[in-house]
Amino acid sequence: MSSYDVKKEVTDKYSLRGRVFNRLREDILSGKYEEHEELKEVAIGEELGVSRTPVREAFRQLELEGLIQIIPNKGAYVTGITAKDVKDIYMIRSSLEGMCARLATENITEEQLEELEENVYLAAFHASKGHMEQMTELDNRFHHILYDACNSKMLERLLVDFHQYVARIRQKTLSTKERGIASNNEHRQIMEAIKAGNADEAERLATLHMNNAYNNMVKNGLYDIYKNEEQE
């Protein structure tokens, strides 16, 4: 378990606001709430079995993250993630993932490296069988192993958040067998560069991996599930 996972568990255990916030953020990013939909404090409080206070506090945090907009005397409305946000996130991730791979090359443990290798081999098996759900889970896990291995809690936290923000579109991307296989081959190359201790190559490949993922979205129109604010 990564340092962020431990921190998140502690937050969820001891902070009611933290639990409400994480649940609402997950619901927004998963598409449970539509863009522009109003979030009602009373209804959410009843659904989660909490008072309005932790819901209100969670709303303020969600607004800071740009996921909702609170309009005085009206209510809280979902803004979500737009197509431009997705593009920006992948542009930023391309640099951060490269940095992460470089740091992971310098800090990865034998246990983490073995887990990366096992992940790649399992993903190749499931890709050959067309098991896209397992591919998505393994893809998520590959990146989280790297985030933990980079040994930087600040970088890890940023990457975990960005990873979660585009969870829906990533699932759509990996739902095609062709991209699933290509993505895992890119993972294998990153893993081999790390195993060889080649930080420059690991950084280059991780950056390329993010660029390829985004270009695949554009090519197939998969990011159209997000509405571009400029088209509204």
Image: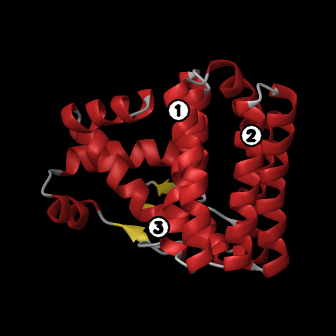
Q: Quadrant of the N terminus?
A: top left
Q: Is residue 212 left or right of residue 101?
A: right
Residue 78 drawn at (x, y percent): 49, 64
- Crowding around mark 1 (Cα neighbors within 10 Å: few <14, some 14 to 19, many 20+) is some
**Which amino acid is tagged 2?**
Glu
Could you tell me which residue is drawn at 82 percent across and 72 percent down?
Answer: 218
Could you tell me which residue is drawn at 59 percent across and 56 percent down?
Answer: 121
- Crowding around mark 2 (Cα neighbors within 10 Å: few <14, some 14 to 19, many 20+) is some
Q: Which residue is mark 2?
A: 192
**Which amino acid is tagged 1?**
Gln
Could you tell me which residue is drawn at 27 percent across and 40 percent down?
Answer: 17
**Which amino acid is tagged 3?**
Ser
- Residue 232: tell me if it is visible: no
Could you tell me which residue is drawn at 53 percent across and 23 percent down?
Answer: 153
Mark drawn on residue 112: 1
- Crowding around mark 3 (Cα neighbors within 10 Å: few <14, some 14 to 19, many 20+) is some
Secondary structure of the residue carrying numbered label 1: helix
